[in-house]
Amino acid sequence: MRMVAQIRTDISFQYKHGFYLAYVIVSVLYITFLAFIPSSWKETAAVLLIFSDCSFLGSFFVGGIILLEKDQGMIQQLLISPLRISEYILGKALSLSCLATVASTFILFASFGRSLHYTPILVAVFGCSLFATFLGMIIAIKVKSVNQYLLVTPLFVPIFFLPLANYFSLPAPKLLEWTPSYSTLQLITNGFYPISYLSFHTFILFSWVLLFFFMVNHQYERTFFKKAGE
């Protein structure tokens, strides 16, 4: 019940601060952009747009949310709340990932209708958004302002997008094919052109998600307990 209540609280907070409106605006812009793309490029453009949307917006928004809650003293209340830190983390990640998944579905359905296989795409968007959100939460707890967050976050962008070289068969280390980014791209592509290795890429993506969940949970527990002892 605490988990459900936390998700509801996070959704209300996100709606109040305009995150849903931002997703609507971005989605409409993406749909408009895809409508004017030549048919020969439309599917590739859609894959890249959905990939960047679920990775960037989740990590960007969660940084703003965490820093807002830090300024408003809401995070400090966790020390006296029955809510577990893991529930607080999952509430943020699940609410934002569901929002990204719904927005991506809206964009793709408006652009391609029922011609796609949506299951691997939605798995990719949900998993990648979880990963990006956890990464954003790790960064957000270490910085003191939104400006610092915006300066630090772009440092991770080149790393996150390196697997695009493998995706487009450019010279790149094969090791990058074990990253969450590459698996996300492969799963999204499966929605357009069904290929094999769905289970493998799903396993790789959610293994990274699980790893980063434990990392952010450890970081937040250490930070909160340290402050409680000061």
Image: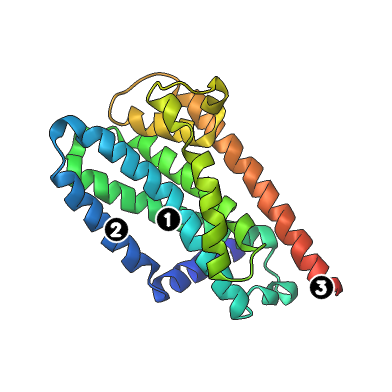
Going from the N terminus, do you reach mark 2 or mark 1 first? 2
Q: Is residue 4 visible?
A: no
Kindly check if marks 2 and 1 are in contact, taking CB atoms under 8 A apart as contact.
Answer: yes
* Kind of residue sitting beneath label 3: Ala
Q: Position of residue 18 (x, y in %)?
A: 37, 72
The quarter of the picture where the C terminus appears is bottom right
Q: Position of residue 51 (x, y in %)?
A: 38, 42
Kindly check if marks 3 and 1 are in contact, taking CB atoms under 8 A apart as contact.
Answer: no
Element class at badge 3: helix
Between 163 and 151, the residue placed more toward the observer is 151
199 lies above or below 139: above
* Kind of residue sitting beneath label 1: Leu
- Quick one: label 2, few (<14), some, or many (20+) residues within 10 Å? some
Taking the spot 69% from the left edge, 47% from the top edge, the residue there is: 214
Report how far apart the C-alphas of labels 2 and 1 lie in the structure: 10 Å
Q: Which residue is mark 1?
A: 57
Q: Which residue is mark 3?
A: 228
Q: Which residue is mark 2?
A: 26
* Kind of residue sitting beneath label 2: Val
Element class at badge 2: helix
Going from the N terminus, do you reach mark 3 or mark 1 first? 1
